[in-house]
């Protein structure tokens, strides 16, 4: 069973790199020890990949898989995505995803405040009506 990317995907990535003018010699590659989930195997083996593009100064770290070969491909693909976004002046996928999450959190926060203020008003109204009821029913 092969754990790496298919030959077609590798060829497509190579073609994309050529189109963008990215040379493999411009990319510094390091294999580093991973961390996090995956147990002892991940912590002891150097399956995580760190790529640095010298020309643009962009870097990527990938440890999505326990396979060094697959991580190498995924890191290269992410680096190419970053370089392409940088060249075209487009916002990075990760940056747009983070921005979207921030907006969602702001909306939730506003909705929560609205709900809390409605609940607080209701509590105040109930207290006032209770006080009014007590004053009306108390003869003394």
Image (cartoon, rainbow, N blue to C red):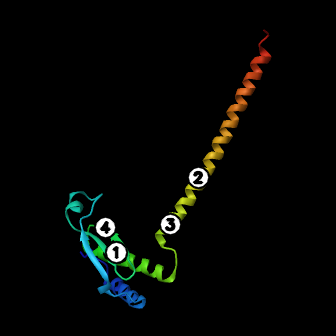
Say left or right for 13 vs 126. Answer: left
Residue 63: which disc?
4
Q: Earlier in the sequence, mark 2 or mark 3?
A: 3
- Spatial CA distance of label 4 from label 2 is 32 Å
Of the image marks 2 and 1, the number of the one nearer the N terminus = 1
Which residue is more in the foreground, 97 or 11? 97
**Which secondary structure lies at badge 3?**
helix
Query: Is 5 placed left or right of 96 in the picture?
Result: left
Q: Mark 3 points at which residue?
A: 97
Distance between the Cα atoms at labels 2 and 3? Answer: 17 Å
Q: Which of marks 3 and 4 is nearer the N terminus?
A: 4
Mark 1 surroundings within 10 Å by alpha-carbon count, few (fewer than 14), some (14 through 19), many (20 or more): many
- Above or below residue 49? Residue 112 is above
Residue 133 occupies quadrant? top right
Disc 2 is placed on an element classified as helix
Between discs 1 and 3, the one toward the N terminus = 1
Q: Within the image, what quadrant is residue 20 found in?
A: bottom left
Q: How far apart, in angstroms, are the residues tagged by discs 1 and 3?
A: 18 Å
Mark 2 touches mark 3? (CB < 8 Å): no
Q: Distance between the residues labelled 4 and 1?
A: 8 Å
- Circle 4 Cα neighbour tier, 10 Å, few/some/many (<14 / 14–19 / ≥20): many
Reading the image, the residue beneath label 2 is 108
Q: In this view, does 66 lie above or below 113?
A: below
Q: Position of residue 59 (x, y in %)?
A: 36, 74
Mark 2 Cα within 10 Å, few/some/many (few <14, many 20+)?
few
Residue 118 placement (x, y as % from top left): 68, 41
> Which residue corresponds to mark 1?
75
Look at 31% across and 81% down and name the residue there.
27
Q: Are marks 1 and 3 in contact (CB under 8 Å)?
A: no
In the rendered structure, are the residues bearing label 2 and label 1 in contact, judged by CB atoms less than 8 Å apart? no
């Amino acid at each position: 069973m092969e754990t790496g990317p298919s030959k077609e995907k590798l060829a497509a990535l190579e073609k994309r790199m050529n189109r963008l003018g990215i040379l493999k010699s411009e990319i510094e590659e390091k294999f580093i020890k991973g961390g996090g989930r995956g147990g002892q195997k991940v912590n002891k083996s150097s399956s995580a990949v760190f790529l640095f593009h010298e020309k643009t100064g962009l870097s990527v770290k990938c440890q999505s898989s326990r396979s060094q070969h697959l991580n190498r491909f995924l890191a290269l693909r992410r680096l190419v995505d970053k370089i392409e976004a940088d060249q075209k002046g487009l916002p990075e996928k990760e940056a747009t995803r983070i921005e979207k999450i921030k907006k969602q959190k702001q909306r939730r926060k506003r909705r929560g405040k609205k709900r809390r203020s409605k609940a607080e008003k209701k509590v105040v109204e109930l207290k006032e009506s209770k006080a009014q009821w007590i004053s009306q029913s108390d003869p003394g």
